Amino acid sequence: MSEITPELVRHLGVLARIQLSDEEVQSLTGQLDAIVDNIAKVSEVATPDVVATSHPIPLQNVFRPDVVGDTLTRDQALQNAPDQADGRFRVTAILGEEQ
């Protein structure tokens, strides 16, 4: 027997301040009933001897070690720049800003 009735769905709609049409009540009755049934199935599987987990597989850190490597000098970084000024890349102004 279904635990979710159209009257319960209407009551929940009133509590949530959602105006539901008769079609929406019928649709939500079936959907909420399916959700409650699925939760009940999961509850049957959850036994005290099954350890609760947040993830099905163990998590591990995937970051590499932070090792300082070779870096470019300012001249090397700017050598192929189409335009440069004062040791920086020079680009056109955007959004109509004058610099």
Image (tube, grey):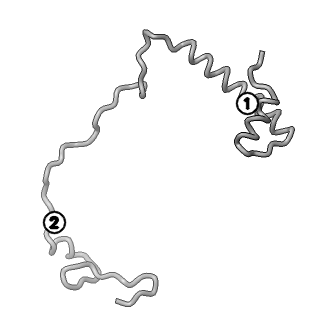
Q: Secondary structure at mark 2?
A: loop
For the point 79% across and 45% down, the residue is 19
**Can you say whether 62 is above or below 47 in the image?**
below
Residue 11 pos. (x, y %): 77, 35
Instruction: Please state which of residues 84 and 51 is positioned toward the viewer in this rendering.
Output: 51
C-alpha gap between disc 2 and disc 1: 60 Å
Specify the quadrant that holds the N terminus.
top right
Residue 82 pos. (x, y %): 29, 81
Specify the quadrant of the image occupied by residue 22.
top right
User: Disc 2 or 1, which lies upstream in sequence?
Assistant: 1
At label 2, the amino acid type is Leu
Instruction: Please state which of residues 37 and 85 is positioned toward the viewer in this rendering.
Output: 37
Residue 44 pos. (x, y %): 57, 12
Specify the quadrant that holds the C terminus.
bottom left
- In the image, taking residue 71 as reference, residue 99 lies left or right, namely right
Total labels drawn: 2
Residue 42 pos. (x, y %): 57, 18
Look at mark 2 in the image and give the residue it sits on: 72
Look at mark 1 in the image and give the residue it sits on: 31
At label 1, the amino acid type is Gln
Query: Residue farthest to the right?
Result: 22
- In the image, taking residue 84 as reference, residue 3 lies left or right, namely right
